Image (tube, rainbow, N blue to C red):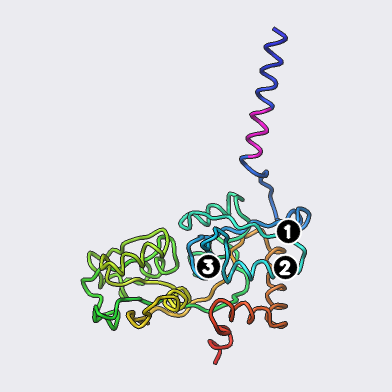
Amino acid sequence: MTKRKNVLLIFLTLLTSLSLVGCGRQKTDGDQWPRIKAEKKVIVGLDDTFVPMGFQNKSGQIVGFDVDLAKAVFDLYGIKVDFQPIDWSMKENELQNQTIDLIWNGYSRTDERAQKVLFSDSYLRNGQVIVALKKSGIKSFQDLKGKVVGLQNGSSGYDRFEKQPKILKDLVKNHEPVLYDGFNEAFMDLNAGRIDGLLIDRGYATYYLSHESNPSDYSVISGGFKPESFAVGLRKSDRELANKINEGLKILKKNGKLAEISKKWFGQDLERQQKN
């Protein structure tokens, strides 16, 4: 009987240990900055196909504009950044469940998202554009009437598509988009003619087309969607953490590091260009 109890005790101990490893850490209430500062580690959630903001390169490394920016901000505090690929459509849930500490991956500020998360200061302006093959003859949003449009599930483009239907949703075939988990597959379908246009962040479009062998084969079309801004998403309780990120962003703007990162990924200082 004693032997059975000992075996059962060992089994329960192992089960508890595995459970803790699987969870990674216990949930805690309140601002997470003291924990992050003590552990010297912060976990950033991202869509690892979102070129050039955060994505896996051919070597399997997670790289990108936001990856470099997050590292630069937390380097100021001696904190290591771990990047965790997530289902982008579940990003706010991952944040609230404390699977991740931050959403930092071309995350646009919207009123709807502001109800769920605390935003940092904006660090880059962005806009939604349509990318189409030039041979399709599509030159405006109106030309997409009855056409098939693709976009990423859970993206700010999807939010705007749904919330401002007169601009695009009411025009396209069946008033519904083709949804993709990432933009790589979307561009494959565009090139194959399975969709007629792709609603996408301007930054991604600029980067993607600059790496195409024939960028002149594509049209980039602006429509009625207003410009938006990228910011970091935090839990509502993480105000001290938000202040640290905002302070870091100000330092990087002032010392030129933000401009350096922008030139690395976009070939130009996007912030300065957008102000002019």
Q: Give the labeled residue for mark 2.
A: 244
Q: Give the labeled residue for mark 3.
A: 107
Q: Is residue 265 above or below residue 22?
A: below
Residue at the top extreme?
1
Q: Most prominent secondary structure in the magenta stretch?
A: helix
Q: Give the labeled residue for mark 1.
A: 33
The answer to whether residue 120 shows anywhere in this view is yes
The earlier-in-sequence mark between 1 and 3 is 1
Q: CA distance from mark 2 to mark 3?
A: 18 Å
Pinpoint residue 260: horizontal percent, then vertical percent: 64, 80
Secondary structure at numbered mark 2: helix
Secondary structure at numbered mark 1: helix
What residue appears at the point 33 percent right and 66 percent down from the top-left corner?
A: 150
What residue appears at the point 71 percent right and 59 percent down from the top-left corner?
A: 80
Pinpoint residue 36: horizontal percent, then vertical percent: 73, 56
Amino acid type, label 1: Trp
Q: Which residues are magenta?
A: 14-21
The answer to whether residue 223 shows anywhere in this view is no
**Would residue 14 be found to the left or right of residue 134 on screen?**
right
- The quadrant of the picture occupied by the C terminus is bottom right
Amino acid type, label 2: Lys
